[in-house]
Amino acid sequence: MKVLDIRKNGLRSIGRQLGEETTLTGCLGERYIGCALQEGILHVEGTPGNALASYLDGGTVLVDGNAQDAAADTMNAGLLAIKGSAGDALAYGMRGGRVYVLGDAGYRAGVHMKAYEDRKSILVIGGKAGSFLGEYLAGGIIIVLGLGHEGERITGYFCGNGMYAGTIYLRTDQTPLNLSDKLLKRDVDTREKESVLRPIITDFASAFSIPAEKCLEGSFIAIEADGSKSYSQLYAAV
Amino acid sequence: MRRYRIRKDESCISCMRCARECSFGAITEGEGRTLVFHHGKCTDCQRCVSFCPTGAIYVTEDGNHFRSNSVFMEDDIREIMLQAETGGVLLSSMGAERGNVPIYFDRMLLNASQVTNPSIDPLREPMETAVFLGRRPEGIERDSDGRIADNLPPHLELSTPIMFSAMSYGAISLNVHRALAEAAAQLGTYWNTGEGGLHESLYPFKANTIVQVASGRFGVHGTYLNAASAIEIKIGQGAKPGIGGHLTGKKIIGDVSRTRMVPEGMDAISPAPHHDIYSIEDLAQLVMSLKEATGYMKPVIVKVAAVHNIAPIASGIARSGADIISIDGFRGGTGAAPKRLRDNVGIPIELAIAAVDQRLREERIRDRVSVIASGGIRNSADAVKAIALGADAVSIGTAALCALGCHICASCHTGRCAWGLATQDPALMERLDPEKGAARLVNLVNAWTREIKEIMGGMGINSIEALRGNRLALRGVDLNSKELEILGIRYAGE
Amino acid sequence: MKKEGEVRISSGCAISGIFCRDGRRISGEAIKRSIAVMHSRSNGLGGGFAAYGIYPQYREYPALHVFYDSETAREETERFLGRRFDIINLSKIPVRQSAKIVDAPLIWRYFILPLPHMLQDSQLDEDEYTSRAAIMINDSITGAYVISCGKDMGVFKAVGYPEDVADFYRIDEYEGYSWTAHGRYPTNTPGWWAGSHPFSLLDLTVVHNGEISSYDANRRAVEMYGYTCNLLTDTEVIAYMLDYLSRKQGLTLKECSEVLAAPFWSTIAIKDKEERRRLSYLRKMFSSFLITGPFSILVGFSGGMMALNDRLKLRSLVAAEKGSTVYFSSEEAAIRIIEESPDRVWAPRGGEAVIVTLDKEAVS
């Protein structure tokens, strides 16, 4: 495995030097790390800057610390796994691939994530998520586990506001605060938990080498758009 | 005098519907199911056109015009002739029509966010249009534990910054009142009784009712005052500042008589001024006596017409103890007003609001009171512009009547409203189903509210109070520098 | 072309702050390193710092930092000051000339004391007396601009990248218990020294990131209470609003934050009864002071600092703690560079102020 120090190598030259598996050390606020990476594995040490793994397109980016804002922005495919927490606007407009955050996510995680044919975005947050989680969600799956926060609220205000497709799963039995009346909340039954959640959560757990069973403990609720409430009736053509 | 010409084409099936609908006697049934058109009586109210099952009938301007003259226009000549014939004061209704007085709303353009801050999708993101109207004290107070005490006087809470203007029972029918009350309740806003009292059957709408106390004091008693959430003292209205009203004895019948507490058949006169208010300190006395009579539980609104001195007048009202100032502009509507007053007295609401808001700020009392703008608000963009100029909320009268069918034929003063609105004729009144009318009003206000949210969202503003007085949201076009100065806005491109 | 103050210029930014709760005074070197990490959030058209605890030997006296365009402006200002204050000490603020910072005005510092009889005649308290004098200089003396006038504190700002501004003012040579920094990204080109941040009024300083959409509603509200917005910047109007709400209305800083970044009505509705009452009151009472649109601010004041985001948290803000030191920044990296392993790193929620003050022992 190659080891590169970002302080000695500029980000652009690093892009050319990446091998199959590379470790990037000493990160401190450098933007665009792993941007549009198509293949290979990139280990990131330190605190990478904004727009980490944006447009990620098949490669794998593993971060040992926290990420800042706009990580996995418009991501297309691949895996971003963050051992710490993520900042605001995580996985905005993500179209495919997996984003795993072991810690918390800031405001507006998973806004306008999508799914298209065989591409399905998956965002798993191990800790808590901030307000506006999954706003405008257009497809894909968001899971918030709230590990270590059992019994607490694990999302902020306006969870799923304006979402029209996809599903938000929360490992809690508490309905998020001020949930929009255009959304439906339902309890997740065992079959769905086993068939939908188990495979994803098992993969998430193995990415951080933690026991999957702990992440699956307890009940989950799901939040989806209420199909009977569309926005189209609000218009009158002149 | 003939203004319009009624025609029909070959698709007429002689069903006589138009004749039955025409309340002005312009279409009557002749012998053998034939239609007779009395063009001179037509007001172009469009009732016949709307109800013709085959689309056979249409009303056009009469093609015969006087010889054109750039000074003495056709209307001038017609009016001279009419007055020569009758010796009468010209009577008209609805709002001022003067093409040469600009509609300033149309000369202001709104802003939107691009790059430097985010716009907002109001359907999917939080967007607040709730407005609180009322007085605010100068400072906070704390109790002995240091907690902030509630020293706010009672406020009106509106879910949207749109309310319904005062229109009196007598000028309009009970069904219109009922539709307005129902709609206000469903919308979470307020309707206003006008000066003709409140029909007992509408007492249950207290939470959404504003009762008016005008110079005639019709139907004003303790129960009436307490059947509302707020009390409005009407000093004047935009269509006829400085003059009173006169509801003819013909309309004082049945429930109108009972509600106004005026004997049947007797004229109901609203004196020009309140004869207990000859000066500003007298207004304070009336404000406070109304508060005393209602236990200080209700905000008091003072409604004035936008006249030349509107800024200092508003300042005086703010200092009179009133909680809310309602300003009705030059284009405000009426059920009946002398045409010369309607078309020549007062100033446009846009300039009035801008001047009042600025004056109250210069006197450091703008936050002490709330301001309502009315008088020619035609759509949601007008409302947004009025708020950006400095109003807390707007009030709509003519637009509300349009929602109920009015086509602004400006014949309210005849009492023969074919749409069943400005009439007390039982047969005509029935033409408005209050339930359906309420539904249309609710639709209208909801649609405007949605548009207001879209406009605010575009500007990146997610709460209506951040729009109030936010004049950077406006830019002027086709305005001179004096107009820009009074409106307190910059020219487009600046 | 109209300069800032004549038109409203929007700008994006980076902010950073360090606060030592134990009153320990640290060199400006740390804050410079922190703000420098976020170089790409600025565009070289404005940078600045506010520092508290830097003038312990003069802590009793308001310290004026003043920009002059000309010697005439300086002379006129000094005459103006001389009529109202004892000038205890005056000097040029020492700078390190640099090719990166150009077009510098004359930069002077004064420690002053209101003349007792003038203060008495004015019927004002000392703070109001001093702040009015500063405002009067800014309004009426051409080419003079007071950039700070609090006690035991000062603002250092210029057109340039913040790290270059730090070198220019030699801020590594100052020691303070509280530091804020700002890197500016205005959308206009010339940049203006006085338009850089922090903006200050007495000991209150504000650095800010974002562009608020409620600007003119807020400006016109605060101008009602005797403030004049000369710069037409968000920072200026926010500083005045805070001064009005805290000093004139007597709100606590937390209450101020609940006015400026008031929760949505739907959020208030799910609070308990007393909170509902309190928050509704503040929103209704001070509705003209609600700020909409994105902002994150750091407010410095004597003995404390407040960090606040808009109610939607549209701008980033990270906080961290290590022992008795608290850090705030637009980006976590800007904290990590000066404190590699904080005890705690967190993102304050939108509208929820984080307020830190000196420990009791540190105050005495």
Image: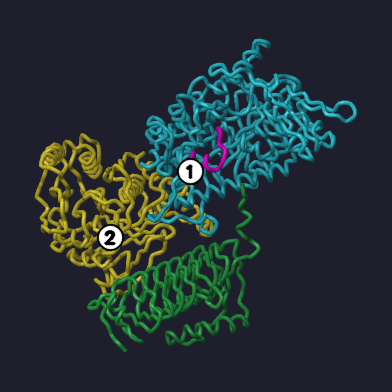
Q: Which residues are magenta?
A: B375-386
Q: Is residue A126 above or below residue B298?
A: below
Instruction: Note whether residue B288 is visible.
Output: no
Q: Chain of mark 2?
A: C
Q: Which residue is mark 1?
A: B152
In the rendered structure, the answer to whether residue B415 lies left or right of residue B367 reads right
Q: CA separation, marks 1 and 2? A: 44 Å
Label 1 is placed on what type of residue? Leu
- Residue B378 is one of the magenta-drawn residues: yes
Label 1 crowd bin: few (<14), some (14–19), many (20+), radius 10 Å: some
Q: Nearer the viewer, residue B59 or B172?
A: B59
For the rendered model, the colour scheme is by chain
Say which chain is yellow: C
Q: Chain of mark 1?
A: B
Element on which disc 2 rests: loop
Kindly identify the amino acid type of the residue bearing the numbered disc 2.
Ser
Which of the image's four quarters has the C terminus of chain C?
bottom left
Q: Write down which chain is painted green.
A: A
Q: Label 1: state its secondary structure.
A: loop
Residue B214 spot, x, y in % from top left? 60, 26
Q: Is residue B457 above or below residue B330?
A: below
Q: Position of residue A169 (x, y in %)?
A: 55, 74
Q: Which chain is cyan?
A: B
Q: Is residue C49 left or right of residue B51?
A: left
- Compared to B203, does B41 lie above or below? above
Is residue B109 shown in magenta?
no
Disc 2 crowd rating (10 Å Cα; few below 14, some 14-19, many 20+) is: many
Say which residue label 2 marks. Answer: C42
